[in-house]
Image: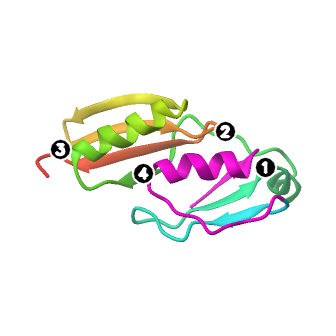
């Protein structure tokens, strides 16, 4: 999965709150890939580079760009809490969904939404 970021360092700091880890990168970098994450491969591209490739600026939608499966319902609450404490948006507070998962939605600094979930009873 990939997202575009207007500030790579700010985006990396946000995604590290979700459990992704990144290698060191320089100030002139326009692309960085996570070394490890919660069951997903994440690539972040500079918005300027993506504008050049797409011919228009990238825009976040009103749906999640991806979902991250966490281990326990408590972890969903903890990650949403870290996101909030760092000053980022929690779009949908953690809740127990009728399909048997603890669910929340957060937004990265550029507005891309990410669902957090874990099976209930885990």
Alpha carbon of mark 1 to alpha carbon of mark 3: how far? 36 Å
Q: Residue visible at 48% across and 69% down?
A: 36
Q: Secondary structure at mark 4?
A: strand
Specify few, some or many for label 4: CA neighbours under 10 Å numbering under 14, 14-19, or 20 or more: some
| Residue 100 circle label | 3
**Disc nearer the start of the sequence (3/2):** 3
Alpha carbon of mark 1 to alpha carbon of mark 4: how far? 22 Å
Alpha carbon of mark 2 to alpha carbon of mark 4: how far? 17 Å
**Disc nearer the start of the sequence (4/3):** 4
Q: Is residue 113 above or below residue 1?
A: above
Q: Nearer the viewer, mark 3 or mark 2?
A: 2
* Residue 53 x %, y %: 84, 59
Total numbered labels: 4
Q: Which residues are drawn in magenta?
A: 1-27
| Residue 110 circle label | 2
Alpha carbon of mark 4 to alpha carbon of mark 3: how far? 15 Å
Specify few, some or many for label 3: CA neighbours under 10 Å numbering under 14, 14-19, or 20 or more: few
| Residue 6 circle label | none
* Residue 21 x %, y %: 52, 63
Q: Quadrant of the N terminus?
A: bottom right
**Disc nearer the start of the sequence (2/4):** 4
Q: Residue visible at 37% across and 45% down?
A: 116
**Disc nearer the start of the sequence (1/3):** 1
**Which residue matches tag 4?**
67
Q: Residue visible at 38% across and 43% down?
A: 79
Q: Nearer the viewer, mark 1 or mark 3?
A: 1
Asked if labels 2 and 3 touch by Cβ distance under 8 angstroms, the answer is no
Alpha carbon of mark 2 to alpha carbon of mark 1: how far? 10 Å
Q: Secondary structure at mark 2?
A: loop
């Amino acid at each position: 999965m990939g997202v575009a970021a207007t500030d790579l360092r700010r985006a990396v700091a946000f995604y590290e709150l979700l459990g992704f880890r990144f290698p060191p990168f320089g100030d002139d970098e326009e692309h960085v890939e996570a070394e490890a994450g919660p069951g997903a491969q994440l690539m972040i591209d500079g918005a300027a580079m993506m504008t050049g490739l797409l011919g228009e600026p990238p825009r976040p939608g009103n749906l999640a760009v991806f979902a991250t499966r966490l281990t326990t319902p408590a972890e969903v609450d903890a990650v949403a809490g870290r996101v909030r404490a760092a000053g980022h948006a929690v779009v949908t507070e953690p809740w127990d969904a009728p399909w048997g998962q603890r669910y929340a939605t957060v937004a990265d600094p550029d507005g891309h939404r990410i669902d957090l979930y874990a099976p209930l009873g885990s």
